[in-house]
Image (tube, rainbow, N blue to C red):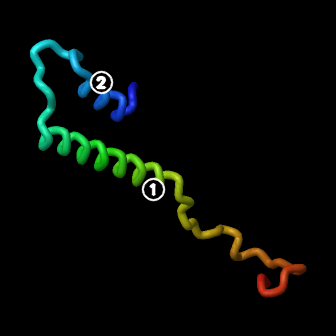
């Protein structure tokens, strides 16, 4: 799958489609805004999945003889 920036570049190349006119400024701005939003969404999902979650430890009932403060 090609990155969205490459697809946008291919859309902007002259002669990439027959009968297509150049993209107007609002359409181009909309495509760039949509690309930015999708990129931010992907970054947020990756960050949420990569962050370690705080899990309660199951070893709190053990007695640690050589560790002060743990038992």
Does residue 60 lie above or below 24 as drawn?
below
- Residue at 83% x, 85% y is 68
- Residue at 19% x, 44% y is 29
Q: Residues within 10 Å of mark 1 (few under 14, many from 20)?
A: few
Q: Position of residue 58 (x, y in %)?
A: 65, 68
Q: Is residue 14 left or right of residue 2?
A: left
* Sequence-earlier tag: 1 or 2: 2
Query: In what quadrant of the picture does the N terminus appear?
Result: top left
Observer-nearest of 57 and 40: 40
Tag 2's secondary structure? helix
- Residue at 12% x, 20% y is 20
Q: Residues within 10 Å of mark 2 (few under 14, many from 20)?
A: few
Does residue 39 lie above or below 23 as drawn?
below
- Quarter holding residue 35: top left
Query: In what quadrant of the picture does the C terminus appear?
Result: bottom right
Farthest-out residue, right = 66
Residue topped by disc 2: 10
Q: Position of residue 15 (x, y in %)?
A: 21, 15
Q: Is residue 19 left or right of residue 41?
A: left
- Residue at 31% x, 29% y is 9
Q: How many marks?
A: 2
Q: Is residue 21 left or right of residue 60?
A: left
Q: Position of residue 40 (x, y in %)?
A: 36, 51
Tag 1's secondary structure? helix
Residue topped by disc 1: 48
Does residue 56 lie above or below 34 as drawn?
below
- Quarter holding residue 38: top left
Label 1 – label 2 distance at C-alpha: 32 Å
Q: Is residue 47 left or right of residue 60?
A: left
């Amino acid at each position: 799958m090609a990155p969205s920036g490459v697809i946008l570049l291919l859309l902007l190349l002259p002669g990439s489609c027959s009968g297509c006119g150049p993209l107007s400024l609002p359409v181009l701005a909309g495509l760039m805004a949509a690309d930015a939003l999708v990129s931010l969404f992907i970054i947020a999902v990756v960050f949420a999945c990569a962050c370690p979650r705080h899990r309660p430890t199951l070893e709190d009932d053990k007695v640690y003889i050589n560790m002060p403060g743990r038992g």
